Image (spheres, rainbow, N blue to C red):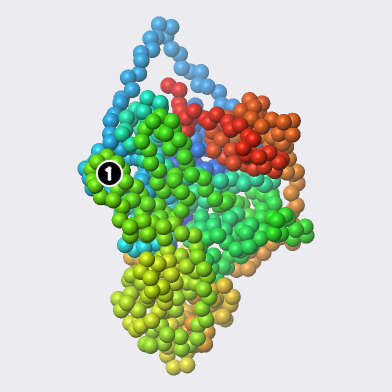
Amino acid sequence: MSNRINEHAILDQPSGNTITFYWKQQKFTAFENEMLASALIANGINIFGHHHKDNMAQGIFCANGQCAKCMVIVNGSPVKACMTKVSENILVESADGLPEINKDINLPSNTEFSEYNTPILNCDVLIIGGGPSGLSAALEISNYKIKTILIDDKNKLGGKLVLQTHKFFGSVEDSHAGTRGIDIGNNLESEVLKSENIEVWHNSTAIYVFKDKRVGVLKDEEYVLVEPKIILNAAGAREKFLRFSGNDLVGIYGAGAFQTLVNRDLVKSSQRLFIIGGGNVGLIAGYHALQAGIDVVGLVEAMPSCGGYKVHTDKLKRLGVPIYTSHTILSANGNETVESVTIAEIDANFKVIQGTEKSFSCDTILVAVGLDSLKEFTEEAELAGIKVFATGDAKEIAEASSAMFNGKIMGLIIAKELGATEMNIPDEWLQKAAILKSHPGNILIKEFSQNANKTSKFTPVIHCFQEIPCNPCMTVCPTGSIKSSSSEEQNSIMSNPIYDGSCIGCYKCLLVCPGLAISIVENIDNESIVSLPYEILNIKINIGDELNIVDINGDSLGFYTVIDIKNNKKIKTQIVKVKMPTDLAYKAISFKVQSKDITKPLDNPILPNKLDETTMICLCERVSVGRVKELINKGVTDINQIKAITRMCMGPCGAKTCDVLLKQVFRQEGVAIDKITNHSRYPFFVELKIR
């Protein structure tokens, strides 16, 4: 198993037994309950088949059952590898071309087909989605003894929390700030499963909300109908895709797919990663890659600065990951799989500046350019006349800390709607909710000197300069010496923390900080001992090592010797201690772990070998930008007509990937959105087996 992650700073190794399966008649091993896509990639298999239209290589793309790029043939039947568990001795073949229907099934001529009696179940509330917002809403609703069914298409609740190894921002009191996402997910799941008022359906997918006010659900391979009084859409969001040359190569996928492999299944999906998008999703994925032992070659962001939290940006930069702002991707380069990426600088009008092209060797490109709310169930329920609410990303894209707290609010709203309580939403809840979903605020740069706040032997130095919703360091300080810089109580978690008091050297603030943005300076004579947080444990640091100590921007302060290392096994953060001059100690916050050789561009840029017109806009049906432009320029403004001619939006993803890109082409060709006739949506949320 060459692509297994055998050591991780945060995650434990899988404990299940290994089983045997066959790929193209060759014997391989996998873990019990592992998804087939992960097992294949763990065994070095990235190409799962070839498209029947043009023989283009296919591989994992969404890892969430939303498309069919990972389709393979298991024991004669086509399945999605990302949603199919490996079982003992299954025979797996690549899906090259169109798979043949199993011809071995012979039905007797006198076979009578009986009508399937679909079970119909009633409940007060049906919650679609077991992520942070759905779980929080369910727990609040359960306080009022309301009969609730919660469904999720995975075998474990938590949604994207299952994939998050980093500590969360937000409020300790209301959104578990300072706790890792995986631990928050486990805690919420445990509470929900213990509730007598919540019935949980794992491996269950909502298919459609019908006009007779029933919801079709594929419940662990059994089709059932649910008739709820209220639907809560907590299904989350899907990742946006991007148009660029070579965007159909194997090795291009979103952050969710990447994190599923490395953080859920401990599969090393790549050796060299390049990231497109500087929001929190892309920045965090870069950090997760380093923790998984993957080289992060670079990150591009089209805007002049990253849209994610500054502490996330700073964390990557100081570990040795270059961030190219005001840049865009031009092309992914390779034959069937990604071999390199080409980027270029762009001007204020987002036009490429010729001569600024740079290419980098990589085998994976992670696209993290935003999310679209999953609104289908809300719209279907409204058409059916069912009372429906939405929460989390299904309502509004925000951080998971916001999703949890707003899920709690939505739970109270639903309880009141059902007459279980007269309680109104407290004003402080609404104020907190507004703060938690706030975009990053002002950046307030501080200057550190050797006498800064020096009132004791130890001094916590807070390298957190941006106003973001976060208060763990203020909460854990036993002496109350870390405080909000704001005097207004309602703004306390949004303002910068400041140190003003007496530090006893307990290191709690350093260990709890989600941004790894706190160091501790201990003054001794004319030198200082600086304690630095570290979580990339696959890159070993030992006492006596010479480290390239850096400031918040990743600029070197010099090489200094490690004199001690403390391991906190509970929090899973190391404290690395170095001795250095006092005049530099207050600037130190981390050290480089990636060498410059990893991030060097190729000697000569590889310019795109495809015209924009040949770039794929519909990956399922292999429809190019040029083909769509041709139809638009002929006057076609009805997307249904484009579908009829090209089959675009008719593939397995049901337009989940291409819809946004298609409308971008309309805008580019000068057609206003209000002049476009939208297409009739895929009738069901995902494809169904015909039985």
Residue 636 coordinates in the image, percent (x, y) = 69, 30
Depth order, front residue of 97/222: 222
Task: Check the image and report above or below for 26 versus 353.
Answer: above
**Residue type marked 1:** Ala
User: Would you say 74 lies left or right of 98 here?
Assistant: left
User: Image quarter for residue 60?
Assistant: top right
Is residue 589 visible in the rendered structure shown here?
Answer: yes
Q: Position of residue 521 (x, y in %)?
A: 43, 82
Left or right of 76 on screen, residue 213: left
Nearer to the camera, 352 or 322: 352
Q: Quadrant of the C terminus?
A: top left
In-front residue for pair 182/207: 207
Say which residue label 1 marks: 415
Query: Circle 1: is it few (<14), some (14-19), or many (20+) Cα within 10 Å?
Result: many
Query: On screen, 557 above or below 488?
Result: below
Q: Residue at x 45, y 76 (%)?
A: 462
User: Would residue 54 be found to the left or right of residue 460 on screen?
Assistant: right
Of residue 246 and residue 666, the one placed in the foreground of this image is 666
| Residue beneath the point at 58% across and 33% down | 678
Q: Is residue 403 above or below residue 89?
A: below
Q: How many marks?
A: 1
| Position in image of residue 37 (x %, y %) | 49, 41
Task: Give the percent coordinates (x, y) of residue 75.
Answer: 47, 29
Q: Is residue 4 visible?
A: no
- Of helix, strand and loop, which one carries label 1? helix
Q: What residue occupies the far top of the structure in this picture?
A: 110
Q: Residue at x 56, y 46 (%)?
A: 240
